[in-house]
Image (cartoon, rainbow, N blue to C red):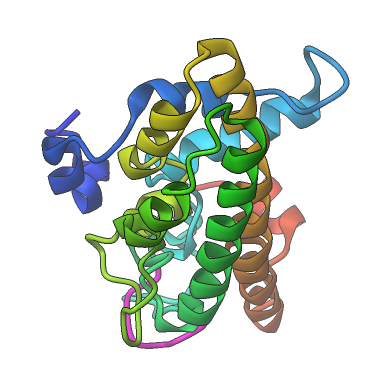
């Protein structure tokens, strides 16, 4: 995994054990749909896997797949225009900074309420622990640092920082996974809406100016 070129943006986090692979697997396989199997579920889970493997179809990948449709050369980020548009840049873009801070602030509040509601000993240290957890540190200036645990979240990977809190306060394994799933689903919905979906909308607008359509991609022949 460390030698996987696509995962080079998070190589150090992998080496340092910053990713909880057990909870990540739970998230990637989770199903919030009514049916056990459906096209919508397959697409949802497929998108998660692509994002965490840094192979989601960002502009650089689209450019490789449809070279005659896209401009030649390096295409800059649609939002900031200061970096190459690729998977690694998603979350690091300075245009995402305020959204990420808002997401993490809300998540810290929701997590505190969730833990307090479901822990028996009512240990009030949870507020301080969450506050000092690197994942919820929003003191960064300008863009999110690549070493920040929030970068893992953006790419649908579960930071160990987060699961440590669940492990400390929720002893029952079944309840722990259930609460985590509920919390993480809400958190990732915000990330997808405010980061990925917003970004996709801007890219689509840009593609329209170049007359790049879904049908042209569908019937593209190399």
Height in image: 116 above or below 94? Answer: above
Q: What's the residue at 41%, 87% (across, down)?
A: 81
In the rendered image, residue 37, in percent from the top left (x then y), is placed at 78, 14
Q: Main secondary structure of the magenta part?
A: loop
- Is 220 colored magenta in this rendering? no
In the rendered image, residue 126, in percent from the top left (x then y), is placed at 45, 47
In depth, the one of 213 and 22 nearer the eye is: 22
Q: Is residue 168 left or right of residue 179?
A: left
Height in image: 55 above or below 91? Answer: above
Q: Quadrant of residue 29?
A: top right
Q: What's the residue at 65%, 76% (across, down)?
A: 202
Counting labels gives 0
Quadrant of the image for the N terminus?
A: top left
Q: Is residue 162 left or right of residue 149?
A: right
- Is 80 colored magenta in this rendering? yes
Height in image: 53 above or below 174? Answer: below
Q: Quadrant of residue 211?
A: bottom right
Q: What's the residue at 39%, 30% (across, down)?
A: 168
In the rendered image, residue 173, in percent from the top left (x then y), is placed at 51, 13
In depth, the one of 168 and 142 nearer the eye is: 168
Q: Quadrant of residue 185?
A: top right
Say whether residue 171 is visible: yes
In the rendered image, residue 141, in percent from the top left (x then y), is placed at 32, 86
In depth, the one of 147 and 68 nearer the eye is: 147
Q: Is residue 180 left or right of residue 133?
A: right
Residue furthest right as drawn:
34
Say whether residue 78 is visible: no
Height in image: 162 above or below 67? Answer: above
Q: Magenta span covers which residues?
A: 78-85
């Amino acid at each position: 995994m460390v030698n996987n070129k696509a995962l080079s943006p998070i190589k150090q986090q992998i080496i340092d054990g910053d990713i909880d692979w057990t909870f990540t697997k739970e998230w990637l396989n989770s199903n919030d749909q009514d049916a056990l199997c459906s096209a919508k579920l397959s697409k949802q889970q497929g998108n998660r896997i692509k994002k965490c493997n840094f192979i989601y179809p960002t502009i650089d990948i689209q450019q490789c797949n449809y070279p005659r449709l896209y401009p030649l050369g390096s295409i800059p980020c649609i939002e900031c225009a200061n970096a190459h548009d690729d998977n690694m840049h998603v979350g690091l873009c300075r245009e995402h900074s305020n959204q990420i801070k808002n997401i993490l602030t809300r998540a810290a509040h929701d997590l505190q309420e969730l833990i307090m509601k479901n822990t028996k000993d009512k240990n009030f240290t949870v507020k301080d622990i969450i506050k000092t957890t690197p994942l919820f540190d929003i003191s960064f200036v300008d863009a999110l640092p690549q070493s920040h645990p929030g970068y893992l979240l953006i790419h649908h990977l579960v930071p160990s920082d987060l699961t440590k809190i669940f492990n400390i306060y929720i002893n029952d394994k079944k309840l722990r996974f259930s609460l985590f799933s509920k919390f993480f689903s809400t958190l990732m919905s915000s990330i997808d809406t405010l980061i990925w979906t917003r970004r996709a909308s801007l890219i689509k607008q840009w593609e329209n100016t170049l007359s790049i359509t879904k049908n042209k991609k569908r019937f593209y022949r190399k």
